[in-house]
Amino acid sequence: MKIGLALENFVPPGNNVDLQKIIKMAKTAENFGFESIWTWDHLLLGSKKVYPIIEPITVLSYISAFTSKIKLGTIYVLPLRPPLVTAKLVSSLNYISGNRLMLTLVAGWYEREFKAVGINFEKRGKILGDYVTILRRLLNESDVNGKLANMTFEHVNIEPKAENVKIFIGAYLENPIKRAARLSDGWMAYYYKEDDFIEGLKIIKRHSMGKTLENSDMVPFYIGEEGRQKVYEFTKTYMDLPNWSKCSVESGIYGTKKDILDRIESYRKAGVSRLVLIPAFYEIEQIEKLGSIINEIKD
């Protein structure tokens, strides 16, 4: 099982994103042998109480200059941007970083963002599906032609190409998981417990048309006796878990070293091929402790 790490490119209201801390987190993850690092995406987050957030492609471009091996992943709300713009950004970052980029594309949930860019919020699922298809063509083909909504593609060719970029779809409802099975290279879950992840994999298997797909789950962690409390407080401060989904704070990994090892193994047995861990409150010391545990698993 591959282990990834989520980075703090957004912070609670009243704070500022600490770029030097992000770089330290990324370099620490690379030094300890994490497979990947991941950033979050929003154009807007909060109204009266604004959550500062650095655009993910931008921050990964910055990180790429300080790292050399670790894969660079991001959650990306694809319907908010024209697919040609996304393709150019993706192609550029992938080239700059030495072909290290991975994408998890999502439909989005924050209606204010969609209103601000003039995209129909109610149709975001269909838009995601349409955009994924054309994005893949733009990243791989040399002569793209066709129409999509009000966009016309006439002999469109983006260079450099980005054929190696894996495109995952993030989803935590049955129909979006079906979309991931049909259109992507893999499914990414969020705050999913093991049993719920297994059910999601069953949906993937039924609708993947025989393709072998990767999968990922993103869950919080904290090493220490106060781990459960830290995970709960962190989730309340940073995250918004949809109450209509299977996302649950009980997906968190916390406790002693043995507790951490046992829970990681539990996710592996559930079929998780990539576990992206979110450090509660993004403490560097926690990343170092987790890195030591990961190296022990490898040994």
Image: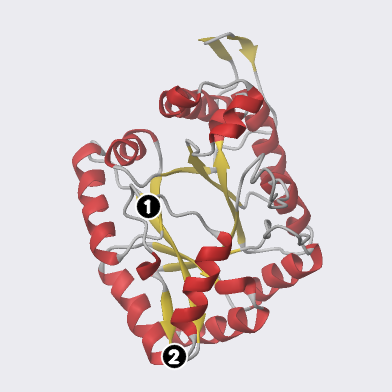
Q: Position of residue 225 (x, y in %)?
A: 47, 91
Q: Crowding at label 2, few (<14), some or many (≥20) Cα neighbours within 10 Å?
A: few
Relative horizontal placement of residue 220, taking residue 113 as reference (left or right): left
In the rendered structure, which disc, 1 or 2, sits on the residue that comes first in sequence? 1
266 up-or-down from 35: above or below: below
Residue at (58%, 25%) from the top-left corner?
Answer: 138
Q: How many marks?
A: 2
184 up-or-down from 213: above or below: above
Q: Position of residue 161 (x, y in %)?
A: 63, 33
Q: Position of residue 112 (x, y in %)?
A: 59, 33
Residue at (66%, 40%) from the top-left corner?
Answer: 44
Residue 59 visible from this viewpoint: yes
The CA distance from mark 1 to mark 2 is 27 Å
As drawn, the label of residue 148 is none
Q: Say which amino acid is labelled 2.
A: Lys
Q: Which residue is nearer to you in this view: 119 or 206?
A: 119
Residue at (55%, 69%) from the top-left corner?
Answer: 234
Residue that badge 2 annotates: 257
Residue that badge 1 annotates: 214
Q: Position of residue 206 (x, y in %)?
A: 18, 41
The quarter of the rendered structure image containing the N terminus is bottom left
